[in-house]
Image (cartoon, rainbow, N blue to C red):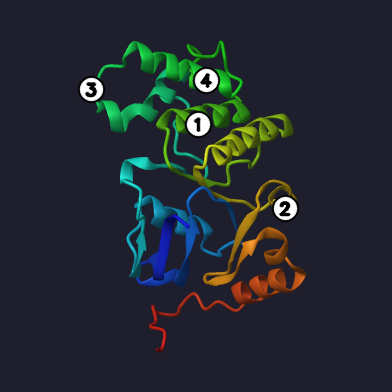
Amino acid sequence: MDIAIRFSDLTLGYDRHPAVHHLEGEVESGALLAVCGPNGAGKSTLLKGIAGTLAPLAGSIALPRVKSRDIAYLPQAADIDKSFPIDVFDVVAMGLWNRCGLFGGISRSQTAKIRAAIAAVGLEGFEARAIATLSGGQLQRMLFARLLVQDAAIILLDEPFTAIDSKTVADLISVVSAWHADHRTVLAVLHDLDLVREYFPQTLLLAREEIAKGKTDAVLTPENLFKARSMIEAFDRQAQACARAA
C-alpha cells in the first residue's frame, strides 16, 4: 500500500496551545477521506499542517511520494477580495503559478487547459467576467477550476460546500469523484454527515485527537459522535502543550 501522508505523534497548534495532538496514522494514496468533528476539533488546523502553512509543535507530517508543489489547498472562506479587478480566467490561471512562476507566460496548451477547467466546473463563457459579479456558488466553481489546473497529487478542501446551492454542490462533488477515480488523494473537511456517508468511503473523526478512522459507516456511529462532542466540551482552553507518557 502506497502512503500519501503519514502522521507521527503530530501536535499542531497556536502559541503553544495544541489544536490537534498526538495524532498517529497514515492516509493511503488515492484515498477519498472526510475529516469530521465538532466545531473546534482541529479539522482546519490539520489541513493547514498538511499544506505546510502551519508548522508542527511536536511530531511530524511526512509526504513520502509527494513534492510540495503537488499539494492543492482550498482554505475555508478563501481569502479573495471580490473588489479586486481580476477576471475568472486570470484567477484560474493562478493554479499554474508553481509551474510558470510569477511573471512566466502561459502557453497555448496551458490556455487550453485553463479553458477546459473552467468548462468542467460549469463556467464556460465566464472567462472574462469580473469576480465581483460572481455569486457564492460561481466563486466556488472558479476556485475548483483553479484546483483542476494545479493538477496536484494531494487535494485538501476545507468546508468546500458551505453556503452554496444544491446544484453547485452536486457538480463539485462530481469533480471530487473524478479526482478519486484518477487515484488522487483527497481530504475534505465536512460538517454534512449525510454528504459524507453518501460520497466519502473513509472518514477521520477528530476531537483534537483521533476518535476513529476507517470506513465511514464504522466511524460515524452514535457512540463515536457522542464521544467527540464530549471531548470538545471538556477541553481546557488554558491548558499548556503536553507530552504523552511513553
Looking at the figure, which quarter contains the C terminus? Answer: bottom left
Q: Residue at x 37, y 41 (%)?
A: 70
What's the mark number on residue 103? Answer: 3
From the image, state whether disc 3 or disc 2 is nearer to you: 2
User: Does label 2 or label 4 sit earlier along the sequence?
Assistant: 4
The residue at which mark 4 appears reads as 118
175 up-or-down from 45: above or below: above
Q: Nearer the viewer, mark 1 or mark 2?
A: 2
Disc 3 marks a residue whose amino acid type is Phe
> Depth-wise, is mark 2 or mark 4 nearer the camera?
2
Q: Nearer the viewer, residue 21 or 83?
A: 21
Q: Is residue 84 visible from the viewing direction of this image?
A: no
Q: Label 2 belongs to which residue?
A: 197
Q: Earlier in the sequence, mark 4 or mark 1?
A: 4
Give the residue drawn at x 72%, y 29%. 167
Q: Earlier along the polypeptide chain: callout 3 or callout 1?
A: 3
The residue to which callout 1 is attached is: 143
- Does label 1 or label 2 sit earlier along the sequence? 1
Q: Earlier in the sequence, mark 3 or mark 2?
A: 3
